[in-house]
Image (cartoon, rainbow, N blue to C red):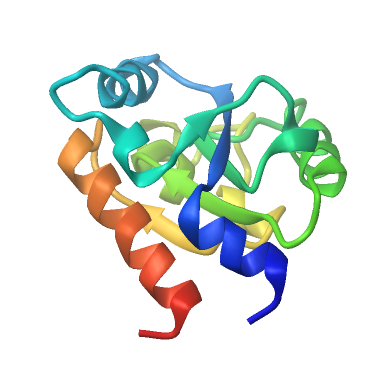
Amino acid sequence: MNLKLKALTKSPWVFHLASAACNNCDIEILDLLTPRFDIERFGMLLVGSVRHADVLLVTGAVSRKAAPLVKRLYEQAPKPCLVIAFGSCALGQGIFKGGYNTPEPVDKYIPVDAYIPGCPPKPEAMIMGVVKLIEKLRGK
């Protein structure tokens, strides 16, 4: 296992990309930072720049206008960069499915490594998804 992947399994830094959402998923992500769930015990840290991120956390349905920005942010992230699609809108467009402005889900624009379904997903689901992703990287 190379050094970057080893560091990624110990302390993944996450950049939250809210492409277009109702903010329910965003509130659940903020709930992860509270002492009740304390996602930082896994070494996870929300960062303010995609250039410092190991994980790109995408919430919301990707609109036509946001699609090039999502692609550009993914390209700017240092590789390997894991992508997590969080919530029903990111997975399959949720209530926006079939809308004229949201033609495709996130995985049609960038490769997605983990899907966490729900509207909004519970913080426990997010923690389980991240733990499974780390186990996948370790080869367990």
User: Is 13 on the left or on the right of 51, as rendered?
Assistant: left
Q: Nearer the viewer, residue 43 or 84?
A: 43
Q: Is residue 13 above or below residue 17?
A: below
Q: Position of residue 94 (x, y in %)?
A: 37, 39
User: Is 9 on the left or on the right of 129, as rendered?
Assistant: right
Q: Position of residue 64 (x, y in %)?
A: 73, 32
User: Is 19 on the left or on the right of 66, as rendered?
Assistant: left
Residue 16 visible in this rendered orientation of the protein = yes
Q: Position of residue 84 (x, y in %)?
A: 49, 50
Q: Is residue 117 above or below residue 14?
A: below
State the residue at coordinates (34%, 17%).
30
- In the picture, the quarter occupied by the C terminus is bottom left
Residue 60 visible in this rendered orientation of the protein = no
State the residue at coordinates (44%, 60%).
114
Q: Is residue 131 above or below residue 127?
A: below
Residue 52 sits in quarter: top right
Residue 1 sits in quarter: bottom right
Total labels drawn: 0
State the residue at coordinates (37%, 72%).
135
Q: Nearer the viewer, residue 9 or 110?
A: 9
Q: Is residue 23 above or below residue 124?
A: above
State the residue at coordinates (44%, 32%).
96
Q: Position of residue 111 (x, y in %)?
A: 65, 62
